[in-house]
Amino acid sequence: MAVATRTLTFREAVNEALAVEMERDPDVVLMGEDVAGGATVEGFEQEDAWGGVLGVTKGLVQRFGRDRVLDTPISESGYIGAAVGAASTGLRPVAELMFVDFFGVCMDQIFNQGAKLRYMFGGKAKVPMVIRTMIGAGFRAAGQHSGCHYSVFTHMPGLKTVVPSTPADAKGLLAASIRDDDPVLFFEHKLLYDTSGEVPEGEYVVELGRADVKREGDGATVVAIGRMVPFALEAAEGLAAEGAEVEVLDPRTLSPLDEDAILGSVRKTRRLVVVDEDNPRCSMATDIAALVASRAFDHLDAPPQLVTAPHTPVPFSPVLEDFYVPSPDRIVEAVRATL
Amino acid sequence: MAVATRTLTFREAVNEALAVEMERDPDVVLMGEDVAGGATVEGFEQEDAWGGVLGVTKGLVQRFGRDRVLDTPISESGYIGAAVGAASTGLRPVAELMFVDFFGVCMDQIFNQGAKLRYMFGGKAKVPMVIRTMIGAGFRAAGQHSGCHYSVFTHMPGLKTVVPSTPADAKGLLAASIRDDDPVLFFEHKLLYDTSGEVPEGEYVVELGRADVKREGDGATVVAIGRMVPFALEAAEGLAAEGAEVEVLDPRTLSPLDEDAILGSVRKTRRLVVVDEDNPRCSMATDIAALVASRAFDHLDAPPQLVTAPHTPVPFSPVLEDFYVPSPDRIVEAVRATL
Amino acid sequence: MDLTKDNAVWIYDRMVTIRAFEERVAKLFADGRIPGFVHLYAGEEAVAVGVCAHLGDRDYITSTHRGHGHCIAKGVPLGEMMAELFGKVGGSCKGKGGSMHIADVSRGMLGANGIVGGGPPLACGAGLTIKRKGTGGVVVCFFGDGAAEQGTTHEGMNLAAIWKLPVVFVAENNQFAESTPVGYHCAASSIADRAAAYNMPGVLVDGYDVVAVHEAAAEAVERARRGDGPSLIEAKTWRYFGHFEGDQVTYRTAEQSAAYREHDPLTWFARQAVDRGLLTAEEVEQRDRAAEAAVDEAIEFADRSPLPAPEEALTDVYVSYR
Amino acid sequence: MDLTKDNAVWIYDRMVTIRAFEERVAKLFADGRIPGFVHLYAGEEAVAVGVCAHLGDRDYITSTHRGHGHCIAKGVPLGEMMAELFGKVGGSCKGKGGSMHIADVSRGMLGANGIVGGGPPLACGAGLTIKRKGTGGVVVCFFGDGAAEQGTTHEGMNLAAIWKLPVVFVAENNQFAESTPVGYHCAASSIADRAAAYNMPGVLVDGYDVVAVHEAAAEAVERARRGDGPSLIEAKTWRYFGHFEGDQVTYRTAEQSAAYREHDPLTWFARQAVDRGLLTAEEVEQRDRAAEAAVDEAIEFADRSPLPAPEEALTDVYVSYR
Ligand SMILES: Cc1ncc(C[n+]2csc(CCOP(=O)(O)OP(=O)(O)O)c2C)c(N)n1
Ligand SMILES: Cc1ncc(C[n+]2csc(CCOP(=O)(O)OP(=O)(O)O)c2C)c(N)n1
Ligand SMILES: [Mg+2]
Ligand SMILES: [Mg+2]
């Protein structure tokens, strides 16, 4: 049966997913720095002054009140750890880590507490929580506000990691993450917020752990993550003009990873290009390349190509940052190298 | 010219490297929880009550005094950040993060401050510091005291990562790390402390970024890290009996990685097995497998084999932990699979 | 002391049970029957027991690496605890956690913690659940003097204060963080003084006097249940054993420990209780014997419990994964 | 005020230079000539200037995301600062850092910081170097009211206290962390009160009164130079612009800002200085013009400076790599 859809921005889609899930389950609470904003400021008792630094959570406090949309101090360990404690005692918190680059001040509560609690307790507890966080370069936000680093969380047992690339996926995957009984890191690329697309109305869930073919083809498999998906599609257009029909695969969930989808596509195309905006070492790019090399070796007709950011922090100057971010052109070259 | 050597344990070798370098350079200072121990306790004014939780820094405070061997509060962000600040203003601190599993409480000062300071400042500063930290399972220390996670630090631009597997390498690489002008993470496997080997006397430096062939062979290339090196050598013995002469390569430094040595060995053996005690996702195992698959694809006669810990935290019960840690038997099987 | 007989019996029973458990664990460790890091609570019994005497099923505690005493005071079965230390299937965590991660969420025990300072944020979260669901419960956050220097402790206390969470922070000041004395690692004259930094009541009590602890906790727990927010109690205490089993304890003198043993919290309380007619000498002896028997039983249970199958290492990471 | 004429001239000059710089940066940002996140210091000039008036070449400061004022007060050249905001090769960081990472280690400016609470541990480290090398220097650690809730601030203050480091902690309480008021995020009545938690002197001053700031800083800096350890100064202040450029500032009223502008720290100080004969009206106007001219020059310098070559993104990560 056809679902009604309409065009929303990525930002609106995330906001809608939060609203729908909070409507659906009173145990879902939001917390983070200025997720409402203006707490205790006269005139903002039940209104938001900010709705998040980039306005993603705007309007939610009006609908759900300050008991469920909690402004926090700049104490990421404190409130993200509180989310872990709340999740293990009956709530479903959605905590916002404003920029993923801030994980260094609260990683213990994420990977040692939230992620391991269930295992260390012998499966006798669960931690149903989501950490929403912004990733990505291109905002001229420099070295401490522009990283990706989802590889670090994907490395950690006990965590699930999700990186949507379209508004519809953002809504459906965030809903799935909130309903999931394990801790989920949900990565939102700040340069995708203003992109738009068709998004189903009402409750909409996209199962975790399922990749999505964003473009079919048999010339080569391009596995792209987050903002690299639109870049890969752009590259694919150019290559199509040259007669090469590449398949663009979006894993959407990095942990669990849809290995079958990746291996299946490569068995068909016999070529792999991985596009990852993260730094190259011990990255998703190496993770996927190693998966394919070790499990589909005989189906590869060319060496896997890795298109990633360089092994450097993110520079400020636009000329430098634009050089840092993988470009559609680099993807085209990489695909050509496999043909 | 032959250097005089004698047998030392890995623990003694680390201790000797610290002593020699502190003797050599008055700017080298040590800091960490109980690195001396008993600070301000009567009778321990210039003596150590502990010398580190496993006795690695024993005796150093007697030789260098409490001005250079500093007990710290349980404030990892505080004192590791202090090491960054001290390094950027003229000292050469060696800070101890007792167990790598504690990185979550201080990662910001490591990867956002120490690692990026030079780059963000346009190369107009340097951060010559070392963070010594214990890694590894097998100690029955359970979920928060047994990880490796050097992959997380190798992922981060601006950091160098070192994992010695022998007493001699421990001494020479630690000396090189202390003399190095960039921040270095130095990983000591707690189960190697009591292993012993020949160690050169006096000043001894092993250049960073150079792998070492621990066993020559042309049957297959086994790249092993840390405690997995002795395991790989044990496996190699068994395989030799079957007539397979495998080459055991120890990268020793993970960042920078000696890519030429790895690629060179694989071009010779045409087979790759990576043995890594760390969790499998976005790991050194995938990093090295992807390197070889993308750069020496045509020289590979078999799919790369990855021997790693599972995607789980480290369990407490000895039966479970022994199952968690990669074994020589699993290495043998992996090599056989490539032959 | 305004304790009822039931209070007194419960308090003595729990204290002596903790003591018996820990002394036996020390022996079992020495005999090589318990692996890993084991941090014993003996000497500090009055703190966990005096505080937990006010807690019930709807209440939670967060603990530390030195968690056995907290577990017993909150009602975790001894057999499951011992089986956990043995790494057996019957353990509180099916052998996956060990001493540093003993937990029993079903009984409000949110886990020992291998990370110093790991607890305060978690306690705030449990407090948030209580507040949101209006259960009337409270959360007690135990932490050591060394943990007072961890940033998470600062963040947790500030968060609990501004959100008026029903959390009671209990600083177990046994005067050392491993081999480092509190006077060196802590700039404050007293950890309780730091309560002022969060506008919460702060009180310093003698952690060897279970009655004093019990009284201070009564007020803090009441305040939390009333919805008036968090409090900080610093209990000055002393551990009888080393930091962990194997520690040679070179940083303290035998005299110091002897002095504390002279005012042992168990014998002191027993004497007081008997003097005040709350307990008879017979009842005390009976409790002593009962505690030993309970620990014997726990060991038998742990012995009988099977070791996990190796493949069990792969389960319980996620509720579901694909 | 017991200021010399030279003090007064320097203070007014720096304050007006910061003001001129920030107001121009606001325009340049609005014109799209400066990308990224830009946090302006206008309104808070008296804090950085009143404190840095006591510092020299051997001294260090750590800063925040709102660092332009600290840079100017510590003597970082305006041209290099502006070129950095433009992402040019001539910038303090060759265009790699931008506003949030402006630094000039050669002048003791250890960097703006994109991480709230990133500075206190770094300040302790610089203090350790000073202490070990006996240079007689001091370190000033500027941090915001919001940063007071970050664990690193707690750890840094405790560490500085127990190691008796020559650090002066300066809390710039502009009463908001982004859109969140200090009264909500901070459980303490005053950040200065927290000094007691570390046994260090704590004082609250009017951050709009540069003389008061100057006096408080004199004492704290002296104490640090003497080797008596750290102090905490809380300066209550107000930012004229939004949290960052682009912020609509919905959480404060125009009246509030107007009230602060009425007591503008620059005009207030100018009036005082003129009344007391430390400055003449002409000198004041001359400084105003000089500041504008200096900023004009800075912009010209920045305009003339070339953009970096794209490949420059790959350099300066390490001193050496293989
Ligand atoms: C974050 C972190 N840092 C260091 C350690 C190592 N460690 C374990 S217990 C301990 C001392 C804790 O002292 P305290 O908080 O006073 O508790 P106590 O052992 O005295 O009960 C330390 C440093 C740790 N487990 N976690
Ligand atoms: C660790 C961390 N958390 C959150 C942020 C996002 N952030 C940037 S500035 C700011 C507010 C800082 O408030 P305050 O310390 O009072 O400084 P002010 O902006 O008022 O000068 C926040 C939350 C950050 N940069 N770093
Ligand atoms: Mg203690
Ligand atoms: Mg502020």
Image: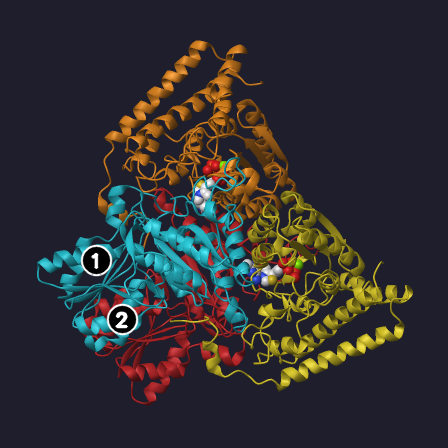
Chain colours: A red, B cyan, C orange, D yellow
Find residue C102 and name its label: none
Q: Is residue B66 above or below residue C257?
A: below
Q: Quadrant of residue A62?
A: bottom right
Please tell me if label 2 and label 1 are on a single chain: yes
Which one is in front, A82 or C283?
Answer: C283
Q: Residues within 10 Å of mark 2 (few under 14, many from 20)?
A: some
Q: CA distance from mark 2 to mark 1?
A: 17 Å
Q: Which residue is mark 1?
A: B232
Q: Quadrant of residue B297?
A: bottom left
- The reply to whether residue A179 is in sight is no
Find residue D275 and report its horizontal and vertical position in percent.
91, 65
Q: Quadrant of the N terminus of chain C?
A: top right
At 39% from the left and 65% from the top, the residue drawn is B155
Inspect the image, locate mark 1, and give the three-letter code of the amino acid beneath it: Ala
Find residue B261 and name its label: 2
Q: Is residue A135 above or below residue C275?
A: below
The quadrant of the rendered image in which ligand 4 is seen is: bottom right
Q: Is residue A290 above or below residue B326?
A: below
Q: How many marks?
A: 2
Q: Looking at the image, which residue sits at the far left?
A: B242
Query: What chain letter is assigned to the residue under label 2?
Result: B
Which one is in front, B52 or A32?
Answer: B52
Q: Quadrant of the C terminus of chain C?
A: bottom left
Secondary structure of the residue carrying numbered label 2: helix
Find residue D109 and report its horizontal and vertical position in percent.
62, 66
In terms of sequence position, does the residue under pointer 2 or pointer 1 come before the other?
1
Query: What chain letter is assigned to the residue under label 1?
Result: B
Inspect the image, locate mark 2, and give the three-letter code of the amino acid beneath it: Ala
